[in-house]
Image: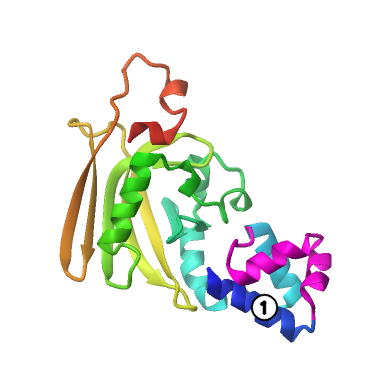
Amino acid sequence: MQDLGERIKRLRRAKNLTQQQLADLLNIDQGAVSRWERGHITPSARYRKELEQVLSAPLMEMDEPLLESVNMDLHFALILDCQLRVLAASETSLAINGCRSREELVGNTYLPLLNDTAMNLYQWMKDAGAFDAGINWARFTLPTPTLHSGYRWMESLWIPFHLANGELVYRISSKLLEMPPSEGLGKAKLEVNGKQLELLVPTQARPSQQPRQQRHRDWHEAI
């Protein structure tokens, strides 16, 4: 999110603050501010709020209607960037992720949860153009990661949007499946530049007599 870093830098300079001075106001290390501004990491929801207070300006002003539509959604809804980082989350998605507050989920990325099979799927999405401007939509029926609650089988629809800074993000609407598909295969389907692509993803069978806690121990063990 290089553009977010550039905005932090511009607002900091507009307030005539050095990186060290901003870091002191936030009670953090100067290196963290430097990494934000270079786009190496992004501030968590907590620090975004504190940055807006210290800098006296919103970080994503023109994107508020999109973000608020997710925050107010009564169903499972998220906004993810192309690194699978959570930018907004509905109350239902917080509950399913096992989170007590938005600050616990927003700013986290699901990428560290991906094993080799899931990373291959993510790479297939990139190669297919899922993170390019030509994407129209994406639909998945897969074991889906949660932050604290293991994995859950979900049907998910990804619709692309562009933030005010031009960054491509996805508004994701999902529903839980009571049972996985009978054939035990996950499915991924994309439409890019009017062309549809589909991928079948083999999933690991889950023994019916295995305790629930063990079945949901790691979401990525399912794919």
Farthest residue to the top: give it.
209
Would you name the residue on which mark 1 appears? 9
Residue 57 spot, x, y in % from top left: 68, 78
- Residue at 61%, 72% in the rendered image: 5
Image mark count? 1
Q: For residue 61, which quarter of the picture? A: bottom right
| Image-based side of 223 in relation to 28, left or right | left
Residue 202 spot, x, y in % from top left: 24, 35
Q: For residue 193, which quarter of the picture? A: bottom left
Residue 124 spot, x, y in % from top left: 28, 53
In the image, residue 58 above or below residue 190: below
- Residue at 30%, 56% in the rendered image: 125
Q: Quadrant of the C terminus?
A: top left
| Disc 1 secondary structure class | helix
| Image-based side of 137 in relation to 52, left or right | left
In the image, residue 33 above or below residue 98: below
Q: How is the image coloured?
A: rainbow
In the image, residue 31 above or below residue 113: below
Name the residue nearer the viewer: 181 or 95.
Answer: 181
Disc 1: CA contacts within 10 A as few (<14), some (14-19) or many (>=20): many
- Residue at 59%, 52% in the rendered image: 102
Q: Main SS type for the magenta part?
A: helix
Question: Residue 30 lies in magenta, yes or no?
Answer: yes
Name the residue nearer the viewer: 65 or 42.
Answer: 42
| Residue type pointed to by label 1 | Lys
| Image-based side of 64 in relation to 45, left or right | left
Question: Residue 57 lies in magenta, yes or no?
Answer: no
Residue 4 spot, x, y in % from top left: 57, 72
Magenta-colored span = 17-44
- Residue at 57%, 56% in the rendered image: 107
| Image-based side of 141 in relation to 144, left or right | left
